[in-house]
Image (cartoon, rainbow, N blue to C red):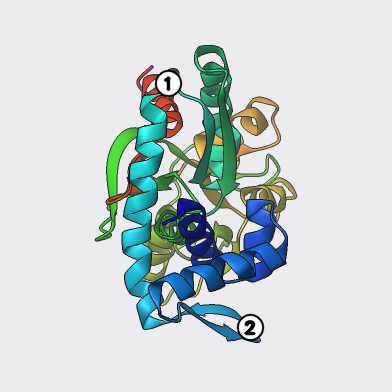
Amino acid sequence: MDTRLLHTFATLARTGSFTAAAAELHLAQSTVTVHIRSLERELGTRLFDRLPTGALLTESGRRLLERAEDVLDAVARLKADGDGAPGGRVVVGAPESLCSGRLPAVIAALRTSHPEVDVGLYATGTAGCVEGLRSGRLDLALLLEEEADFPDVTTEPIAREPLALVCAPRHPLAERTHAAHWAELVAEDFFLLEQGCSYSDELERRLLAVPGARPRLTRFGSVDAARSCVSAGLGLALLPLTSVQEHLRQGQLVRVNGPGFADVPVRLARHRRRWTAPAAQAFAQALVEHSSR
């Protein structure tokens, strides 16, 4: 069987679109169609239902996908064994704060040690990272989670990320010498990251635990958006220290003297069943080395 057909099949299964699969594979859409029809003819079964909304795997297609991924992994391993030094592209998903704070230094170090490895970053939260690993769109992911229990994704803690509760310099809490209590904080406006962000969700739970509390919470999908609102004096935010260090240094933000927040574990995640290619292994090693400094 031509493994090119399996590669096209797996890509279409992941993207759910002939157009998207063709763009990713750098093929004409008609070629993707020919590949899928050839594979269906060879196997004697229909693999996709062609719907107006896209291509949906049939039951036969779902059974084939797991086996196809095993075959493609085996082929990739054979190629890697003869390639020598790690090379190729590795796609990594991570929260925006890590993409802008922790990972640039890792990529810079990797370019020195393994110049043939090309890293693509995809900024997303935990749900997006897990979905990306499951679909094969991501090779590795970083999660900011105290716990991460997913049956098909394995994780290992590699570092801890300090958090900072911040406000603008002119905010009433900026010059407090004694720590603000939760009963005081619930009267403030908070700018949190989107649902599923572990430390934002924990902050919300602690605020709502105050009797009679009705905190004003605004959720954003962007660290930059939350940070900008706080810089403008509109409220408070709990963010990774790496994402606000420069703003603190320049005096654009101030740390609030308030309750303590535990550092959040940084977890390196990968799909439990899929093989980790040499390029991804090189990235993981550089990440662990950088995080241990």
- Residue appearing at x 32%, y 53% in the figure: 70
Foreground of the two, 144 or 106:
106
* In this rendering, position of residue 121 left or right of residue 1: right
Residue 289 screen position, x and y as percent: 38, 20
Tag 1's secondary structure? Answer: helix
- Residue appearing at x 55%, y 12% in the figure: 112
Residue 20 screen position, x and y as percent: 66, 63
Tag 2's secondary structure? Answer: loop
Q: CA distance from mark 1 to mark 2?
A: 44 Å
Q: Amino acid at mark 1?
A: His
Q: Amino acid at mark 2?
A: Thr
| Label 2: how many Cα within 10 Å (few below 14, some 14–19, many 20+) | few
Assess whether mark 2 and mark 1 are in contact (beta carbons under 8 angstroms). Answer: no
* In this rendering, position of residue 129 left or right of residue 12: left
Which label belongs to residue 53? Answer: 2
Foreground of the two, 279 or 50:
50
Residue 193 vs 100, above or below: the answer is below
Which label belongs to residue 198? Answer: none
Residue identified by numbered label 1: 290
**Where, by quadrant of the figure, is residue 250 drawn?**
top right
Discs 1/2, front: 2
Looking at the image, can residue 128 be seen?
A: yes
- Residue appearing at x 40%, y 78% in the figure: 44
**Where, by quadrant of the figure, is residue 235 drawn?**
bottom right
- Residue appearing at x 33%, y 44% in the figure: 74
| Label 1: how many Cα within 10 Å (few below 14, some 14–19, many 20+) | some
Looking at the image, can residue 262 be seen?
A: no
First in sequence: mark 1 or mark 2?
2
Foreground of the two, 11 or 78:
78
